[in-house]
Image (cartoon, rainbow, N blue to C red):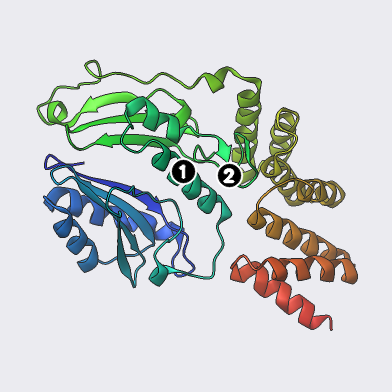
Amino acid sequence: MNAAGISLGYMWANSLQEKMGDAPGLWEIFRRVIENSRDLRTAIEIIRQSNRVSAANLLIADAKVPDAVVVEMTSKKVTVRTASPGGTLHSANHFVSTEMQEPVKDPNSFARYQRAGDLLKASHGRIDLPRFVSFLRDRYDVRTKRESLSGDVIAWNIGVMAAVFSPRDLTFWVAKGLAPAVYSEFVGFSLKDELAGTQANTSLPTIPKDPVVSSQAYQGFMAYQAGYIALLEGNFDQAVKKISEAIPTDPRSGRYRFSLATAYMHARKHPEAIRAFQEALATDMNDVLRAYSYFHLGRMYEEMGKVEKMRTFFAKVLTLAIGDPDIEGHARKALKDQK
C-alpha cells in the first residue's frame, strides 16, 4: 500500500504456461506499481508494460475513488476484472476471466473462491475488521459441506502470512507465524505513522488469536503441519510419525491420509503406501488429490510388474484429467506400451 491509497494484493495463479518458481521475479513489478501509481489506470499500465515472468492474480484497490480491480496475468496475457455495480470483487489461485481459461483443475482454489464470494455477498455493506478477519479464518469447505482445518478452505494450511489493508485511512493489519498464519494475532499499523518514523501498533486494535488454537483438532493439525514439513525435507519416517498423530483428530481428512501415503511411498514402504492411498481414496478428498493417488498407485504397481492393476489406476488418472501433463503423459504412455 502506498501513501496515495493504492493497495496491491498478490496471489499466485495456477497456469500451465508458467512456473511457480519464477514468481519472485514479479516483485520488481509490484514495487514499481506501489512507488509510481496514484490511480488504477497507472497501476494497470505499469503491469501491462512490464516483463511479466510468472502467472498471478492481483487485487488492486484505490481508496480515493473508491474502486478496485483484479488483474489476471501470465507472461503473455493480461486481463482486468471489475466488480458489477454494487457488487464485490475477490480472487483466489485460478483465473476467472474467460479469455484466461486453461485446461487445469484446481478444486481447492475453486472452493475457496466460492466460499469467499458467499461470505462477501452475505455481509456486503457490513464488513468491518473483525468480520473480515473471520472470513480469512473461515474453515467451511463448500465441496464437502463441513468444517475442517485441513479441507479446501479459505484458511488454507500453507499461508505463512495474512494482511488486511484499509487504503481509505492508510491502516493495515498483519498476522504471521506458523502456517496458517490467519489463526495468529493480527497487529495493526498506520502507514502515515510508519512513514513519519513512528510505529503505530499500539494505537490500533489488535485481533486476538482464533480460539481454535486451543482445540484438540488444532493440535492434530499442527502435528500434520510438522509432518508435512518433514515430508518436504525428505525426513519420511518423521513425516509418517507426525501425520499419523493427526489422523485420529480428523479421520475423514483426505489430505491427512494422502500425505501419509505419500510419506510411506517415498520411504519405499509400498504395502503401507498402497493401503494408505486406498484409505485416502475412501474419503471425500478433492479430484486433484484423487488423481495423484491413482497415479502413485499405478506407478507402484508398474514397478511391481502388476500390469492389470497398473492399467486400472492409470486409466482413472486419464478419466479425471486434472490437467497435469506429467502424470497424464506418463499414464498415457504406459497404457499405450502395454497394449
Amino acid of disc 2: Val
Q: Nearer the viewer, residue 24 or 36?
A: 36
Give the mark nearest the N terminus, 1 or 2: 1
**Secondary structure under the numbered disc 1 in the rendered image:** helix
* Amino acid on which the number 1 mark rests in the picture: Asp
What residue is at 56 percent from the left and 62 percent from the top? 105
Name the disc covering residue 118, or none.
1
Q: Is residue 130 visible?
A: yes
Element assignment for label 2: loop
Q: Is residue 233 above or below residue 201?
A: below
Q: Is residue 309 above or below residue 258?
A: below
The answer to whether 227 is drawn above or below residue 74 in the figure is above
Kindly report which numbered mark, 1 or 2, lies closer to the viewer in this rendering: 1
Q: Residue at x 57, y 17 (%)?
A: 214
In the rendered image, is residue 176 in sight? no
Quadrant location of the C terminus in the rendered image = bottom right
Q: Position of residue 301 (x, y in %)?
A: 84, 63
Judged left or right of residue 190, residue 120 is right
Dot 1, crowdedness within 10 Å: few (<14), some or many (≥20)?
few
Q: Position of residue 8 (x, y in %)?
A: 26, 47
Mark 2 burial class by Cα count in 10 Å: few <14, some 14-19, many 20+ = some
Badges 1 and 2: C-beta atoms under 8 Å apart? yes
Cα gap from disc 1 to disc 2, whole angstroms: 10 Å
Point out residue 136 in the picture as x, y percentages from the top left corner: 44, 35
> Horizontal and vertical percent for residue 2?
16, 42
Q: Residue at x 39, y 72 (%)?
A: 99
Residue 13 in the figure: left or right of residue 302: left
